[in-house]
Image: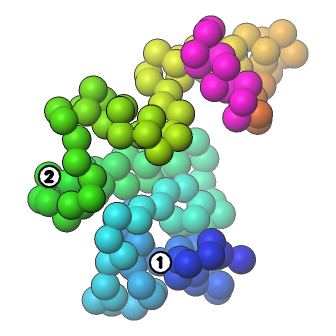
Amino acid sequence: MGIAGLPFDEKKGVIPNREGRVVEKAAVGAAVVPGVYVSGWVKRGPSGVIGTNRMDAEETVSSLCADLIEGKLPSLQVSQPGLGGISPLLATRGAHVVDFGGWKKVEGEEEGRGKASGTERTKITSVAEMLRLAANG
């Protein structure tokens, strides 16, 4: 089952892509869908661990940044490079930005909960709780 409006390869269980850029179909030379990117299992299929997802995300973000620099995302206009330029745009679109410090707060909480239960970490699965922790600690 795919996402409405996006191509989906039912056999592989992925959204067809090249380096995280969504393409119209799973075929060599298929056209890129401008401004649409994927990462994680929907990018490569249901396999891998956190490290694999992180590498996928890094590749996808590199593709997105390259497209932005090359002017392939004309509707995305930012006032300055980096987080300072993209954060206001994301806020207008209702996105919740979590910076590295916020991520470290969530990671610390997961590790603390894990230690208390005798494991390496206990994953927090509530997005609302993760956002609260990232913002407040």
Q: Which residue was labeled with disc 1? A: 16
> Of helix, strand and loop, which one carries label 1?
loop
**Residue 34 in the image, given as x and y percentages of width and height:** 32, 71
Q: Amino acid at mark 1?
A: Pro
Q: Quadrant of residue 116?
A: top right
Vertical order, 58 against 105 (above or below): below
- Number of the label disc, if any, that sits on residue 3: none
**Residue 114 in the image, given as x and y percentages of width and height:** 78, 18
**Marks 2 and 1: which is nearer the front?**
2
Viewer-proximal residue, 76 or 126? 76
Q: Quadrant of residue 115?
A: top right
Viewer-proximal residue, 11 or 74? 74
Q: Which residue was labeled with disc 2? A: 69
At a point 51% along the width and 65% down the height, the residue shown is 43
* For marks 2 and 1 on the same chain, the one whose residue lies earlier in the sequence: 1
Q: Over which residues does the magenta segment extend?
A: 127-137
Viewer-proximal residue, 96 or 50? 96
Count how many numbered circles sit on residues in the image: 2
Mark 1 nearby-residue class (10 Å; few <14, some 14–19, many ≥20): many
Q: Quadrant of the C terminus?
A: top right
At a point 73% along the width and 25% down the height, the residue shown is 129
At a point 42% along the width and 84% down the height, the residue shown is 24
Vertical order, 94 against 25 (above or below): above
**Residue 8 in the image, given as x and y percentages of width and height:** 57, 81
Q: Quadrant of the N terminus?
A: bottom right
Viewer-proximal residue, 15 or 74? 74
> Of helix, strand and loop, which one carries label 2?
helix
